[in-house]
Amino acid sequence: MWSRLVWLGLRAPLGVRQGFTSKADPQGSGRITAEVIEHLERLALVDFGSREAVARLEKAIAFADRLRAVDTDGVEPMESVLEDRRLYLRSDNVVEGNCADELLQNSHRVVEEYFVAPPGNISLPKLDEKEPFLHS
Amino acid sequence: MLGRTLREVSAALKQGQITPTELCQKCLSLIKKTKFLNAYITVSEEVALKQAEESEKRYKNGQSLGDLDGIPIAVKDNFSTSGIETTCASNMLKGYIPPYNATVVQKLLDQGALLMGKTNLDEFAMGSGSTDGVFGPVKNPWSYSKQYREKRKQNPHSKNEDSDWLITGGSSGGSAAAVSAFTCYAALGSDTGGSTRNPAAHCGLVGFKPSYGLVSRHGLIPLVNSMDVPGILTRCVDDAAIVLGALAGPDPRDSTTVHDPINKPFMLPSLADVSKLCIGIPKEYLVPELSSEVQSLWSKAADLFESEGAKVIEVSLPHTSYSIVCYHVLCTSEVASNMARFDGLQYGHRCDIDVSTEAMYAATRREGFNDVVRGRILSGNYFLLKENYENYFVKAQKVRRLIANDFVNVFNSGVDVLLTPTTLSEAVPYLEFIKEDNRTRSSQDDIFTQAVNMAGLPAVSIPVALSNQGLPIGLQFIGRAFCDQQLLTVAKWFEKQVEFPVIQLQELMDDCSAVLENEKLASVSLKQ
């Protein structure tokens, strides 16, 4: 039955199948505006850092857009593969804890039993206020 | 001794042919000799020797804890190990010493295993080459094997030997290199999209991914909570079953573990005949990018089952071509959420900026994460934006159900086990691999392995044969959910039939040359 997979190979339409690489992805469609960049950086608290990173995001979005081709009418989203099972609940008894010292050891800045954070409620500078890498 | 299987060494320990301390020291010295592979981030020498001493006492008193007592193992560096640095190959966690053991690590230690060290990986297990961690890439031991070197000598175009080394695959490449180079008998990896099976195929090992919910994830630094699973890398199926027997089971600390009773211990029956089996060959997995060598081995494997009486049929998993896209969306979204915990406040790297919490978090995360991780976080956040949530994240969740249902339908039609390739080709040279970026490589290399993670099914990669270049090629078996034992039984039968050759690392094995030279894994008998 060596012929079986050879037959399968002939059936796979060459050229029609896109393949799984991103070679087919169109270049960025420009939907990543400066506003979106700022918004994402604020939400993620991670900066893009370079134009390449923005280009990579655009490619990632173009890649994800392929999902539109799938017909999902009437399909429920799946959150977990174990959705048909009951969650195990244990009894509400304290069995461990009291390890404040161990937990505090890993932090860089600690005062007595507190983690020390810089002041909150100060927003990150807006894009036009800080050094914008996009405009440089 | 280092080339033996776990079961054989365990028998040798019980019979007193070797002591745990001697075994430990042999492994430690081999780790030092193979340092150039960069498989280990941390070698826990003192801890291992102490554990060996305790194991030796137990053996002397006739109180060994079981098959794993005194056996050197390695653990991927995204499992928390108490008192031992756990970095996930990232600047974010450099110097982080967890105060607790991951459940799977604890289970292995409770069985008396010796922890040799923490192995290298892609940063935060994101990648398919083990090349993107801060401690550098991992080299595939097969780059230095006699089998590969001899083939290269025949090729007049081969350049300088050392610059052409091959990748191990990823992201559990360090674990794979550690086991493949005989520095330990088993290693833990993690499998989110194929991160255990991919390096297993490239390094000629058995890479097993248990069913989601069978093994606890507590202590495994999470990447994608709904798909992560601790994986097992060993040199033969039997060894993987022994380790699985120690690890499987419910854990009150991981609410996604299943509480059904499981047959323990995991003794795999030897399958006498396969005539009652139905093997499915998914036709959508035959893609143009598949190398002709892998395709031919796949075909031969199907023929093998058929010639031994099994029913081999073609099946269809219609949504296969969308699974990599779906995985991309779900993975980046969950990553965006999981990486949010790294803010420098309670653990991990913290920058010097003190102006505000937000500025501190942002700078810490910029310094701590590499481009790959940051890219995924940003992509994930994009897909989770209010305006995109329905169209990307929820859509991907719906497609996930379609993919999982594909598998259910196939298994309901009477198929016991699916047979597919694990990777598109054999291991490629590092210089070749880095020509494309991480996301592109992952989307190419994960195509056969990640649909399994989306459906939560068990899967195993078995090394089948060497390619024309002398490098390992593996094939993947996929089983029904929670039928891990059946899956491993079929895999064990197949492994016996193919008799994959042992890697010949002659130059490194001064102590055990005679033992390795003529041994074939499948044909060594147990001396009981």
Image (cartoon, coloured by chain):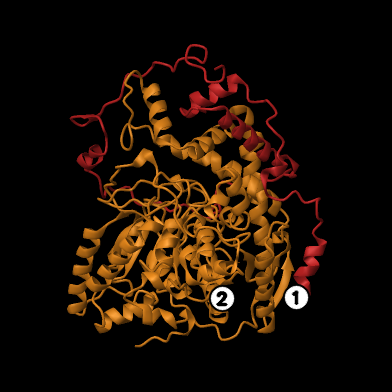
Q: Chain coloured red: which letter?
A: A
Q: Residue at x 50, y 46 (%)?
A: B126
Q: Whole-percent x and y of residue B389? A: 61, 33
Q: Is residue B66 left or right of residue B314?
A: left
Where disc 2 sits, the SS reads helix
Q: Whole-percent x and y of residue B347? A: 31, 37
Tags 2 and 1 touching, CB below 8 Å: no
Residue at the outermost front position: B156
Q: Are marks 2 and 1 on the same chain?
A: no
Q: Residue at x 31, y 76 (%)?
A: B511
Q: Amino acid at mark 1?
A: Trp
Q: Is residue A67 left or right of residue A57?
A: right
Q: Amino acid at mark 2?
A: Val
Quadrant holding the N terminus of chain B: bottom left
Q: Whole-percent x and y of residue B448? A: 62, 58
Residue at the outermost top position: A129
* Number of other residues with Cα within 10 Å of mark 1, as a class: few under 14, some 14 to 19, many 20 or more: few
The residue to which callout 2 is attached is: B490
Quadrant holding the C terminus of chain B: bottom left
The image's mark for residue B481 is none
Q: Is residue B243 left or right of residue B111?
A: right
Q: Residue at x 59, y 20 (%)?
A: A34
Q: Is residue B119 above or below residue B480?
A: above
Identify the image quadrant of residue B329. Answer: top right
Q: Chain coloured orange: which letter?
A: B
Q: Whole-percent x and y of residue B258? A: 46, 59
Real-space Cα distance between discs 2 and 1?
Answer: 22 Å
The subunit letter for the residue under badge 2 reads B
Q: Is residue B3 visible?
A: yes
The residue to which callout 1 is attached is: A2
* Number of other residues with Cα within 10 Å of mark 2, as a class: few under 14, some 14 to 19, many 20 or more: many
Identify the image quadrant of residue B384. Answer: top right
